Structures are given as C-alpha cells and as structure tokens.
Image (spheres, grey):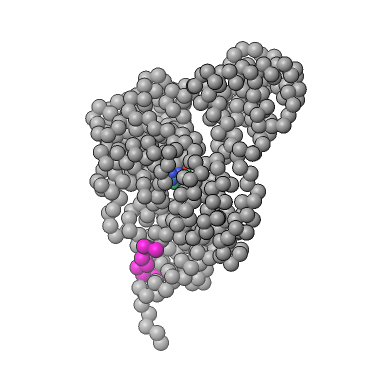
C-alpha cells in the first residue's frame, strides 16, 4: 500500500489543477501562479500558500470558483481550495471591520506591469514619485483620462508600492461609489463620527473615479472637509477621474481648485508602439507566447483602449484552445476578424443620441422639440454634427430625425460646432469625451 502523505498528495493534485486551468481556463492563469505553494490536502480542503496578502485576497475574492471547479474535476471529489498567506507582506490595508471591505487589489496592477509611452509617461512618473514620498511629492495627485486607459492600474500600483516600502502604511483605496454609499448610510444612521474617523485617520486616501461625485452636493461638502483634514496633515490624496477637474459637471469650485492645486496628469490612448508593448506584456503575464505578427495584428486591430486589447488576447486564447493550443495568425484572424477598428466603425443615431443626452443630461424629446434654448439647442447641434461625421445619413435625413428640420439647419449646426471646436478648448475636450464614449460601447451603457 502506498504511504499517504498530505503534503505530497497536495503537490500532485496542485500540479493537475494548474494543468486543468491552463487547458480549460487559460485567461485566468497568471505567471505568478507558479509561486503558489500547495501545503496540504486534508479533510476535503487543498491548502495553498500565497506569497503576499494581496495575492491571497485576490485569489480568494476573484478566483476561488474556478480553482474549486478545477480541484473537483481532477480529484473527482468535493474538494475546495483554501488560500492562506504565511507572511504579512502587503498587509497594511486599512481595515475597520465595519463591513466596508476594501477593494481587492489586483496583483497584476503593479508598476512593473505598466507599459509607459508618450500617452501616460507623466502620470506614471507622478505615481511613482508619490509612492516613494507619500504626502511630500505631489499632493493631491489627480489622474484623468478615458475609460480603460490604465487609471485604476496606476492607482493600485501606487498603493502596492507604498505598501512594499512601508507595510504598515494606512492606505484606504476605494471607489467613489463606496464613498458615496458609505456617506449616505452614515448620514441616515447618524454615524458621522465613525465616518469621519474612517476617512480622516489614514496616511493615504485613494479614490477611484471621483467624477461620480458630480451633482452629489452633500457628499462633495463632506469630501471637501475630508480632503482638507488630510491635506493639512500632509497625508497623501490620490484621485482618478474620466475628466480633468474643471470639466467634471457640477463639481463645486472649491473642490475643483483643490484638485488643481497638486499635480494633474492625463492618460491618453496608447499609440501603436505602446499597444504592441502592452500586448506583449499582457501575454507574458498570462504565461503565453504570441508570435510577433500576432502581437502586431492585435495592436492594429484593437485601438480604442487598453482594456479591449486585453479582451482581444482573451478571445485569441479561447480560439487557440480549440486549435490545440496553437497561437498563429489563423487563430488571431478567426478571433478578431469581426472587430472593426474604431476609426472605421460607424455608429447609429440612437447611440449618438444616447451618448449626447447622457452627457448633457437632456431628453431625446427635447432634442426633437421646437425648443431653441441653448441648453437644448447645443446638444441638438452636437448630435447633428456627430451624426454627419459618423453615419452615412444625408443632411435631410439627419434634420428629419431631430424634429423635422431642413438641411440648412443641419449645415448651420455643423458649421457652428466646427467653429466652436476650433476656438474653444474646453468645448473641444467635451466633444472628444463624447466621441470617446461612442468608440467604447461599454462606456455608453455603463
Ligand atoms: P481605467 O481605470 O482607466 O478605466 P484600467 O486601469 O482598469 O483603466 O485599465 C484597463 C486594463 O488595461 C487593465 O487590465 C490594465 O492593466 C490595462 N492597462 C491600461 N494601461 C496599461 C499600460 N500602460 N500598461 C499595461 N496595462 C495597461
Ligand atoms: Mg478604473
């Protein structure tokens, strides 16, 4: 009879689990999984040790189901996986035990995995400087740019680097939604002192997507005081947003001026060379090797944002699985053939209406009405302008859709918007954001 040893049994099961994942769930696999160590297999639980708390929380929070499926498939038993950590590395995330769990940091979102190029160099350098000297380099640090361009990645990398240097740093990283919800709940329950304690006793406060504070007057008021308290005691504040401070609609002036008082860094769409480097980096992280022509193909095909580049790799992984694990141009074409580059993509009038009405907070019925007030006329003209650029409809057809107007009205709208765009930088930036939203269907529906 073979001797039964919980440790070596764990090792052989773990090896099969990794093979199972590589075979059936390759997009989940990360290179750093290679550092995970199986500890024991006992009483229906496979215990695996991660190197850091951040990895452990990520595995428990994001990957547990897929690991459970794998271990059950390879053992044929109702086994589950439990991830533990033996060290305290990266354990300094502030926790107050109030049920507002901090966001799970992704072990992928570190500086080492962030590709820099002209599009994001300033933001990257600023984040690194802040990570080295929290509260002393740039305060606040405000990172803004379109959807999927790496803001969250940079913010999380900054947190992880601060923790690496000072494991006891009290960092609070959260989404703006969490801040808003927590605030409202504390107001309702009369727990404002608890709320203030939580947000004002940290070394670093990081709020992702701060533009969601738009129109939230009371939360803005509270955030203003949080900001001042932290700022006055040299505590670091890091914010991200989809727009620069003065273009966030309905943001109090005093907050806008606070946001502008530190360093404001913009991230832009990556250029072709940067996209190539990103694809190569992402493939490596997933432990796959893509031939040069496939990397170039992805970078050419997918140009709207970096998140979609990753989506492209995931698609190719899926097709490669059906193709015996081979990554070549046939697989790449089959996977991405239906993606039309954003610059060639046509959009529909309802999509334009959706993006514009959301941006200006008006209704379609207003656009189609006879109203001529500027608050309605401007969004209407913007719709006509974009419709002319991005669809094949004639001037008459476009005029017809927006309240039965004739083609001269549409021509006038196009001229007005073109002039404004050339002379008014703030307006040009607004248009750009609407166009960006249209190029990223996700951003419109979100
Ligand atoms: P945002 O918060 O701006 O919407 P994210 O930070 O979530 O965007 O980025 C989307 C995806 O793109 C993430 O997987 C991120 O790792 C990746 N990404 C974005 N920019 C870069 C970059 N410069 N280098 C490597 N990965 C990037
Ligand atoms: Mg983000």
At x 49% / y 72%, what residue is drawn? 75
Tell me where residue 376 appears, x and y as whole percent.
Answer: 62, 17
Quadrant location of the N terminus in the rendered image = bottom left
Q: Which quadrant of the rendered structure holds the C terminus?
A: top right
The foreground one among 363 and 408 is 408
Residue 202 appears at what percent x and percent y?
Answer: 28, 37
Q: Residue at x 58, y 47 (%)?
A: 301
Q: Residue furthest top?
A: 373
Magenta stretch in the rendered image: 34-44
Q: Residue at x 55, y 40 (%)?
A: 304
Where on the picture, by quarter, is residue 2? bottom left
The residue lying toward the viewer, choosing from 160 and 10, is 160
Res 320 seen here: yes
Horizontal relation, residue 115 to residue 355: left or right: left
Residue 88, image quadrant: bottom left
State whether residue 121 is above or below residue 253: below
**Residue lying furthest bottom in this view?**
1
From what the image shows, is residue 35 above or below residue 199? below
Depth check: give the residue in front, 239 or 195: 239
């Amino acid at each position: 009879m073979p001797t039964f040893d919980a440790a070596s049994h764990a090792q052989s099961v773990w090896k099969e689990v990794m093979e199972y994942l590589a075979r059936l769930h390759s997009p989940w696999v990360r290179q750093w999984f290679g550092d995970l160590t199986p500890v024991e297999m006992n009483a229906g639980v496979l215990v695996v040790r991660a190197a850091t708390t951040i990895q452990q929380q990520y595995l428990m929070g994001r990957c547990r189901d897929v690991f459970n499926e794998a271990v059950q498939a390879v053992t044929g038993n109702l086994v589950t996986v439990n991830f533990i950590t033996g060290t305290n590395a990266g354990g300094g995330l502030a926790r107050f035990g109030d049920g507002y769990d901090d966001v799970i940091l992704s072990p992928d979102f570190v500086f080492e995995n962030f590709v820099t190029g002209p599009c994001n160099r300033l933001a990257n350098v600023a984040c690194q400087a802040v990570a080295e000297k929290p509260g002393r380099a740039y305060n606040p640090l405000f990172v803004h740019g379109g959807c999927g361009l790496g803001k969250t990645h940079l913010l999380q990398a900054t947190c992880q680097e601060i923790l690496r240097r000072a494991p006891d740093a009290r960092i609070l990283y959260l989404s703006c939604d969490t801040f808003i919800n927590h605030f409202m709940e504390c107001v309702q329950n009369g727990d404002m002192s608890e709320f203030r304690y939580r947000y004002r006793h940290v070394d670093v406060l990081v709020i992702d997507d701060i533009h969601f504070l738009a129109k939230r007057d009371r939360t803005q008021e509270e955030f203003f005081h949080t900001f001042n308290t932290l700022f006055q005691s040299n505590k670091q504040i890091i914010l991200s947003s989809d727009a620069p401070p003065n273009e966030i609609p309905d943001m109090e002036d005093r907050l806008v001026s606070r946001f502008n008082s530190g360093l404001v860094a913009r991230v832009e769409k990556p250029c072709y060379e940067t996209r190539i480097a990103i694809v190569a980096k992402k493939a490596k992280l997933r432990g796959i090797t893509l031939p040069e022509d496939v990397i170039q193909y992805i970078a050419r095909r997918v140009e709207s944002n970096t998140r979609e580049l990753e989506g492209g790799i995931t698609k190719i992984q899926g097709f490669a699985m059906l193709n015996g694990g081979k990554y070549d141009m046939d697989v790449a074409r089959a996977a991405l053939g239906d993606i039309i580059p954003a610059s060639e993509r046509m959009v529909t009038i309802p999509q334009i209406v959706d993006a514009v009405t959301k941006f200006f907070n008006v209704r379609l019925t207003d656009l189609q009405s006879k109203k001529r007030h500027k608050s309605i006329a401007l969004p209407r003209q913007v719709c006509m302008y974009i419709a002319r650029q991005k669809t094949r409809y004639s001037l008459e057809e476009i005029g017809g859709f927006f309240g039965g107007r004739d083609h001269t009205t549409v021509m006038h709208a196009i001229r007005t918007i073109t002039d404004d765009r050339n002379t008014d930088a703030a307006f040009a930036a607004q248009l750009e954001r609407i166009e960006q939203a249209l190029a990223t269907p996700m951003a419109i529906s979100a």
